[in-house]
Structure formats: structure tokens, C-alpha cells
Image (spheres, rainbow, N blue to C red):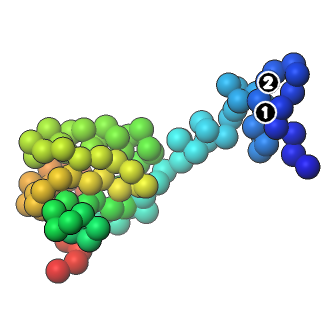
Amino acid sequence: MALVYSTDSGRVCPECRQAQADCRCKARAQAAVVGNGQVRVRRETAGRKGKGVTVILGLPLTADELTGVAKQLKAACGSGGTAKDGTVEIQGDHLDKVMQWLQKAGYSPKRAGG
């Protein structure tokens, strides 16, 4: 049985056994590199009621860096978007703009899908 609460420190992380506020597991998870380095760019419409999004996969960045790249790409495309599950999603069909931006940033992106 794992310890989840202590009267001294309150809630306890079951993995590192530190107080929830001092948990080291979250810091390690955020510092981990998400992508594999093979940058792929594709357009998706599945599950979005026919609306297209441009998806960037495989960026070798941490979660915080991925959020920063998403912000820069959204500004470059003049569109909304998000960074989630190790991918960056930009609303709309912006394949060419995203490919150019990634090349200028030093990545070698490839188109994926049809």
C-alpha cells in the first residue's frame, strides 16, 4: 500500500514520497524531451467536424519549449493552435508556412500523409 497522505506534510507523491508541493516527478516529466527528432508536418481533419489543422510531430523539445514553439508558429501563421501530447496543432491549412518556419529554425521537416 502506498503512502498518499502524511499529517506532517499533507498529500504525498506515491512515486518519490515527497510532499506534493516538493514533488520531483513533475519536474522530471516536464524536462523530458518529447519528440524523436524526425519532424513531420501533416494536415488532419479527423474528429474535427471537417475543419483542418496542421499538425507538427517529432520536435525534439521539452513540454515548455514545445509550448513556446507553438506560440511562435501561431503568430507566424496568424491563427490559433495548441501544444499537446508532444505535438503542435495550428488551426487551418498552413503546411507551406509551417514548413518554411521550421526550416528557418534549423529543423528538416518532411510532409507526412497525402
Vertical placement of 31 versus 53: above or below?
Answer: above
Residue at the location (58% across, 45% down)?
A: 29
The amino acid marked with disc number 2 is Gly
**Residue at (17, 53) in percent of width and height:** 91
Check disc 2 and report the residue beneath it. 10
Decide: is 10 above or below 58: above
- What x and y, as percent, mark residue 59? 35, 55
Q: Which residue is mark 1?
A: 12
Q: Secondary structure at mark 2?
A: strand
Q: Secondary structure at mark 1?
A: loop
Q: Badges 1 and 2: C-beta atoms under 8 Å apart? A: yes
Callout 1 crowding tier (Cα within 10 Å): few <14, some 14–19, many ≥20: some
* Quadrant of image for the C terminus: bottom left
Q: Amino acid at mark 1?
A: Val
The structure residue drawn at horizontal position 33% and vertical position 62%, both measured from the top left corner, is: 57
Residue at the top extreme, as displayed: 8
Q: How far, Cα to Cα, is label 1 from label 2?
A: 6 Å
* Corner quadrant of residue 55: bottom left
- Name the foreground residue: 97 vs 7: 7
